Image (spheres, rainbow, N blue to C red):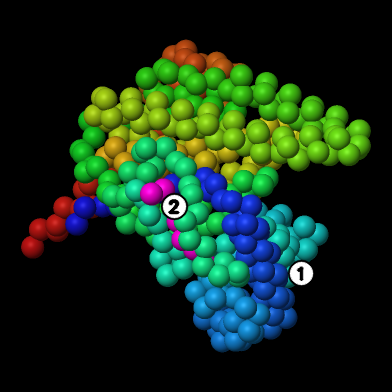
């Protein structure tokens, strides 16, 4: 069976004023019910989908919510509590016993009035050629709602299996985020691995020596931080309007930068027939402690997003990806494997205390990761060989 991946296709809806009003009323209605369901889940301790459905489904239906929308609504609440519990276990809400951690689970989850609502094939249908959709709302079935997208997105919607879709409202604009199942390219046997060291000063450094510096992005973030501080201190209505208008600009810019970097890395690995070795940075925000001036830079950089972009683009291209332990990779010599904390004498400079090799610190780390990736691949490849009788 050919391996497949699930990607998200974002299409922009262009509804008429009447259609937009129906969509807004729908999100308000389902999220009002979601908050009521969340209160029941919190009060009774019932946070799993099916037990919770038994408690609240009839009431949600009596409030005028369609059957399929009601089931999605209840599952949305259950999933939110599951995510909260997972985040607490992983330390995303502070250390055990901290005030923040205690507060995270001390009150019911609240959904915004315009929070996204899931749809599926039972209450949402596409007409890709006409570029229109039909979907359920609290004011009846809306038909012929126009949407726009790129030719590549339209092709994905028309040719591949569609899954659930989220109806999203962003600053008065409507979107559908549609999950689409697409086939992956066959994974090839790699001829070595391209190590990728991720960082803040240099966003990504490959074992080939290609450095994608973060200087421009970090300057941009500092400008955005200063602007937010200035507007928040001013506190006028116009300042608040500007804050609201600018709130997603930095995340969009960062996302675009990560897409470009991921595309370059995957293209280089594919061109040379190698795999990609990524450092496993799971939970780094909770593990790493920095001085206060450094915290904004650490926590505003999306480690996970860049790694996810590299992984999914590699799967689409058939490029093997391995995730390796990055412990002490910045202190280990890629030439002789000697590890010492004084090997890295500065952010950019590495001098091995054993063999004397001098290298750029991030490039040395990426070469260490490349070797660890090859070792991990070999171990996995060997484990697939049947045991001799």
Q: Which residue lies furthest to the left in this view?
A: 389
Residue position for label 1: 107
Mark sitting on residue 75: none
- Residue 271: where, in percent of width, then height? 27, 25
Does the rendering let one see residue 379?
no
- Residue 79: where, in percent of width, then height? 56, 67
Q: What crowding class fits label 2: few (fewer than 14 Cα within 10 Å), some (14-19), or many (20 or more)?
A: some
Whichever of callouts 2 and 1 sits on the residue coming sooner in the sequence is 1
Label 2 – label 1 distance at C-alpha? 41 Å
Residue position for label 2: 132
In reply to whether residue 207 is colored magenta, the answer given is no
- Residue 187: where, in percent of width, then height? 23, 42
Viewport quadrant of the C terminus: bottom left
Does the rendering let one see residue 102?
yes
Looking at the image, which is closer to me, 77 or 325? 77
What's the residue at 84%, 39% (across, down)?
240
What's the residue at 34%, 53% (across, down)?
181
Which residues, given as a range, are shown in magenta? 130-136
Q: What crowding class fits label 1: few (fewer than 14 Cα within 10 Å), some (14-19), or many (20 or more)?
A: few
């Amino acid at each position: 069976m050919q391996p497949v991946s699930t990607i998200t296709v974002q299409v922009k809806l262009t509804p008429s004023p009447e259609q937009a009003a129906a969509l807004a009323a729908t999100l308000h209605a389902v999220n009002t019910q979601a908050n009521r369901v969340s209160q029941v889940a919190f009060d009774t301790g019932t946070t799993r989908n099916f037990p919770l459905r038994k408690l609240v489904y009839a009431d949600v239906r009596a409030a005028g919510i369609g059957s399929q929308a009601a089931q999605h609504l209840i599952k949305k609440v259950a999933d939110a509590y599951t995510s909260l519990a997972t985040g607490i276990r992983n330390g995303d809400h502070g250390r055990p016993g901290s005030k923040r951690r205690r507060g995270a689970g001390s009150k019911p989850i609240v959904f915004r009035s315009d929070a996204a609502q899931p749809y599926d094939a039972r209450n949402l249908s596409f007409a890709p050629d006409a570029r229109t959709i039909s979907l359920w709302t609290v004011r009846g079935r809306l038909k012929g709602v126009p949407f726009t997208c790129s030719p590549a997105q339209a092709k994905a919607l028309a040719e591949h299996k569609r899954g659930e879709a989220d109806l999203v409202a962003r600053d008065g604009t409507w979107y559908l985020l549609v999950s689409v199942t697409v086939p992956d390219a066959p994974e090839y046997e790699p001829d070595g691995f391209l190590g990728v060291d991720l960082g803040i000063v240099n966003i990504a450094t490959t074992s080939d020596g290609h450095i994608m510096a973060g200087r421009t992005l970090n300057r941009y973030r500092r400008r955005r931080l200063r602007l937010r501080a200035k507007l928040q201190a001013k506190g006028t209505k116009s300042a608040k309007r500007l804050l609201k208008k600018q709130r997603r600009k930095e995340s969009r810019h960062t996302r675009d930068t990560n897409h470009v970097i991921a595309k370059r890395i995957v293209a280089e690995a594919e061109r040379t027939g190698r795999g990609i070795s990524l450092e496993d940075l799971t939970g780094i925000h909770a593990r790493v402690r920095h001085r206060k001036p450094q915290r904004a830079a650490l926590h505003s950089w999306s480690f996970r997003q860049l790694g996810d972009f590299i992984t999914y683009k590699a799967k689409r291209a058939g490029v093997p990806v391995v995730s390796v332990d990055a412990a002490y990779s910045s202190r280990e010599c890629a030439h002789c494997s000697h590890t010492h904390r004084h090997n890295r004498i500065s952010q950019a400079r590495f001098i091995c205390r054993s063999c004397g090799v001098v290298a750029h610190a991030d490039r040395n780390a990426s070469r260490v990761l490349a070797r660890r990736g090859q070792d991990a691949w070999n171990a996995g490849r060997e484990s697939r060989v049947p045991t001799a009788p």
